[in-house]
Image (cartoon, rainbow, N blue to C red):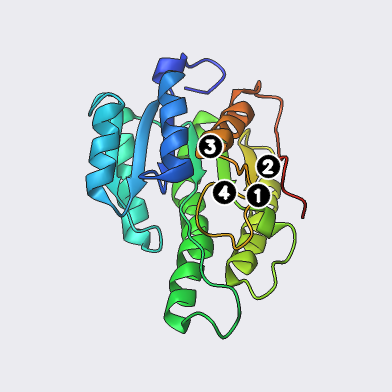
Amino acid sequence: MTNETSAPSDRVFLITGASTGIGAATARHAAAEGYRLVLAARSRERLDALAAELGGPERALAVTCDVAEWEDQQRMVKGALDAFGQIDVSFANAGFGGARGFLNDTPEHWREMVLTNVYGAALTLRATIPALKDSRGHLLLTSSVAGRRVIPGSMYSCTKHAVTAMGEAVRQDLHGTGIRVTTIEPGMTDTPFFDNRPSDPLEADDIARAVMYAVAQPPHVNVNEVLVRPTAQQP
């Protein structure tokens, strides 16, 4: 079954980092548009509450997953296919930031950030691509404005530059398969991460709408990158 012929209520939308923020907002928007959901994150309590809100086991499957663990990613995909039979959209969204300054964070935190933001995203691609080939589906990655311009002293920015490169590398790799690839690049969003936030930052819902815009395009249209800044953000 392809995404050209599936009814919206048949399609399956998998999201990592789904328990909060952009992931949870995207899950709510996708559910409103009729998708069945596979919600993955490390926080099972929040996942269970979100899955219950969005329809319970028949519509939303909660899967505990540390994206830096290949076995967890494989189990996530197996659970999705066992429950719903297909994956039409895979959103590699899990990630987090850290303190700026190459002397202001710990090596341990750096390691976890790189494993989650870069290695974890790559594992999500690897785990879901076979199912997306079957559905001629859509692959999305969360990068950042910080993945387009360097933020001084930011290891997070380095990881997001890698994700932006990964999005283009996998797009070229999947050419001819029918899989579309989109890199989402949010600007300053309503989190405490940024030191100098604009007075009116983006909300998670703003990014979720950008995700759904890319997904909603007809199969011959591939929105490769979506860069979304608050109107008040200058750099």
For image coordinates 32% across by 56% down, the residue present is 72
Q: What residue type is disc 2 on?
A: Pro
User: Mark 1 near mark 2, Cβ–Cβ under 8 Å?
Assistant: yes
Q: Please name whichever residue, 62 or 127, is drawn nearer the observer in this view of the structure.
A: 62
Residue 122's place in the image compared with 128, above or below, is: below
User: Mark 4 near mark 2, Cβ–Cβ under 8 Å?
Assistant: no
Question: Tag 4 or tag 3, which sits nearer the N-term?
Answer: 3
x and y percentages locating residue 169 in the rendered image: 68, 54
Q: Nearer the viewer, mark 1 or mark 3?
A: 1
Residue picked out by circle 4: 142
User: Mark 3 near mark 2, Cβ–Cβ under 8 Å?
Assistant: no
Residue picked out by circle 2: 230
Question: Tag 2 or tag 1, which sits nearer the N-term?
Answer: 1
Which disc is residue 133 wearing? 3
Q: Nearer the viewer, mark 3 or mark 2?
A: 2
x and y percentages locating residue 136 in the rendered image: 56, 31
For image coordinates 50% across by 42% down, the residue present is 91
> Distance between the Cα atoms at labels 3 and 4?
21 Å
